[in-house]
Amino acid sequence: MTPMAPPLSRRHVIVGASAVVGAGALVSCAGAAEEPAPAQGESGVLATTSQVPVGSALIVDGIVLTQPAAGEFTGFSAVCPHAGCAVSKVDGAQVICPCHGSTFGLDGAVVSGPAREPLAPAPITVRGDSIVAG
């Protein structure tokens, strides 16, 4: 007659499952060093240069990214200086505030009010094909 193994306790099952999940996490992290440049939102990356249309803008993470001419990128705060609302729409070469209709050009300057001050500059850096905050 063969002796039966004692039943597994809940603690043993949880410890075993944790070990399997932990090992899976380690294996997935091991390949992370081989991945390309960080994706949008990681390590300060706001967007790729191809995501900002030439002659237009992209609003991401509170920053207006503009590309007035091919390869020329600038950043501005997405906070409208009139009443503090966030600009949220891009129409061609104009950035529009939804609160009171102020529009701004790709240089941050006021195109039409009620805003009287331009959008504040926001520092950005282009690293390869990534646009990074700061």
Image (cartoon, helix red, strand yellow):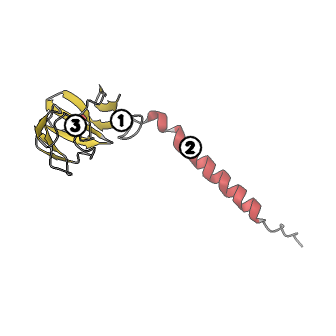
What residue is pinned by disc 1? 45
Front position in the image: 9 or 71? 71
Indicate the secondary structure of the residue bearing disc 1: strand
Front position in the image: 71 or 104? 104
Q: What's the residue at 29%, 42% (across, down)?
A: 60
Q: Is residue 66 left or right of residue 27?
A: left
Mark 3 or 1 closer to N-term? 1
Indicate the secondary structure of the residue bearing disc 2: helix
Which amino acid lies under the numbered mark 2 shown in the image of this protein?
Val
Mark 2 or 1 closer to N-term? 2
Which amino acid lies under the numbered mark 1 shown in the image of this protein?
Val
What residue is pinned by disc 3? 50
Where residue 20 appears, as percent x and y from the top left, is: 64, 53
Question: Which residue, as the protein is rendered here, is positioned at the far bottom?
Answer: 1
Front position in the image: 126 or 90? 90
Which amino acid lies under the numbered mark 3 shown in the image of this protein?
Ser
Q: What's the residue at 26%, 47% (across, down)?
A: 85
Q: Quadrant of the C terminus?
A: top left
Among the 4 quarters of the image, the one containing residue 114 = top left
Q: What's the residue at 22%, 29% (across, down)?
A: 74
- Find residue 27 and name its label: 2
Indicate the secondary structure of the residue bearing disc 3: helix
Front position in the image: 124 or 12? 124
- CA gap, disc 3 to disc 2? 32 Å
Q: What's the residue at 87%, 70% (across, down)?
A: 2
Residue 127 appears in view: no
Where residue 17 appears, as percent x and y from the top left, is: 66, 57
* Callout 3 crowding tier (Cα within 10 Å): few <14, some 14–19, many ≥20: few
Mark 3 or 2 closer to N-term? 2
- CA gap, disc 3 to disc 1? 13 Å
